[in-house]
Amino acid sequence: MEPSVLFIHPDLGIGGAERLVVDAALALKSRGCRVQIWTAHYDVKHCFSETIDSGIPIRCCGDWLPRNFFGRFFALCAYIRMIFLAFYIVFLSGEAFDVVFCDQVSACIPIFKLARNRKRVLFYCHFPDQLLTQRISVAKKIYRAPIDWVEEKTTGMADCILVNSQFTAKIFKDTFTSLSDIEPDVLYPSLNVDNFQPGVSEGLTELVPAKRKAVFLSINRYERKKNLNLALESLCTLREKVSLQDWEKVHLVVAGGYDERVTENVEHYQELNDLAVKYDISNHVSFLRSFSQKQKLCLLQNCICILYTPSNEHFGIVPVEAMYMYCPVIAVNSGGPLESVVDNVTGFLCAPSHEPFSDAMEKFIKDPSLRIRMGKSGHTRVLEKFSSDAFSHQLYQYICKLVE
């Protein structure tokens, strides 16, 4: 009998972590596993389409609990929500399952160990949570100290720990010093290629003027840590490097995950719009919020290059999606892109500065055939290194070992 796997995730919205959870659930379902996803928040208007169409049960519990107190204590609230969700699953839901797939918040792991039939837990570490926030004040350091301790101790309670890249594996070892005896395995996120089948291109007439044939694309959430400013600064610098005729062909589309509940999303979206006006490039930039999969495919088919601006990104699925769609990538030369993008082959790896980024962008303006050559190389690399079959097989083996 195939294993039964329960996924538990804080907020099943739209993001890299959510993309992996959904793909992992689909991968195990394709292997015959019984799969269900439990979450503290789920909105059918702000989710991946597969959560609606795949037939995987989605259970939501604990959304009545606060996400913050007066705009603060987000981490504490996230821990409380996940602990409550785990308690409900174990002691009140009546659900039967063999393995728990947990990610992002490890604080719920001890609850599954308290179950009458002690559950086996697989924890997928996208990145240590304690490194995702700055400790500016003494009060913040005091507040985070017990949360960081809980994260490290509960992470170590998992029966199997996976990370999304060699980069994250090193950060894991450097951060969780008390877990030095644990060697996390790397399971690269994969691409569900069924969602990226090129269709008939509809063009970008709603977003981009018809005369703009050199379209650059940025895909990332509207968060300051994603350094979307770099895309605008690079576009501004590019204007000084190309002829007026070439400049009139250039356009940038900034497409990002956007949730009105998240203050930073709302604020940063406006900040970027203001920055485009400040640089006098607003008529060469379009901003798109919470786009559909159909819109994403259309953008990837019609752009000449992806600008991937975060530094020290844990993995970054966007470059992989772009390369599969024959679209080259200009990315910051740190973190996950060092493992996904091959410099001068599938794109360019650059220092996080507008000068090298604009230099790379200029190459695509001067040599349009570069998009075709690098696009083919990128597509081949995804098939060889990030296939859904390899991801599915590897994950299934981990689940089976836990059950045995």
Image (cartoon, rainbow, N blue to C red):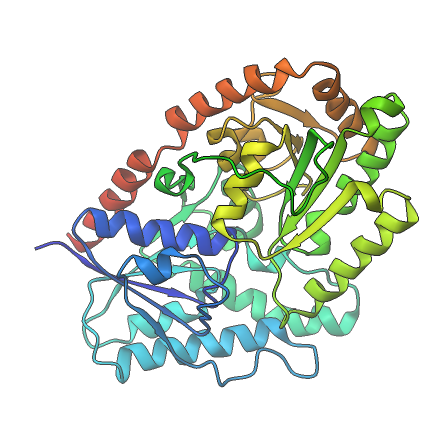
Question: Percent from the top left, x then y, of residue 275?
Answer: 86, 51
Question: Percent from the top left, x then y, of residue 104?
Answer: 48, 60
Q: Quadrant of residue 388?
A: top left
Q: Quadrant of residue 216?
A: top right
User: Would residue 9 appear left or right of 25 to someone viewing this image?
Assistant: right
User: Would residue 350 appear left or right of 369 to someone viewing this image?
Assistant: right
User: Would residue 211 appear left or right of 110 to someone viewing this image?
Assistant: right
User: Would residue 42 appear left or right of 404 to someone viewing this image?
Assistant: right
Question: Percent from the top left, x then y, of residue 58?
Answer: 33, 68
Vertically, is 123 above or below 376? below
Residue at 74% from the left image edge and 20% from the top image edge? 365
Vertically, is 40 above or below 161? below
Vertically, is 48 above or below 358? below
**Image quarter of the N terminus:** bottom left
Q: Quadrant of residue 110?
A: bottom left
Question: Percent from the top left, x then y, of residue 229?
Answer: 78, 46
Residue at 57% from the left image edge and 70% from the top image edge? 147
Residue at 74% from the left image edge and 31% from the top image edge? 211
Observer able to see residue 46: yes
Q: Nearer the viewer, residue 391 or 183?
A: 391
Residue at 24% from the left image edge and 66% from the top image edge? 119
Observer able to see residue 319: no
Extreme residue in the left direction: 1
Give the mark count: 0
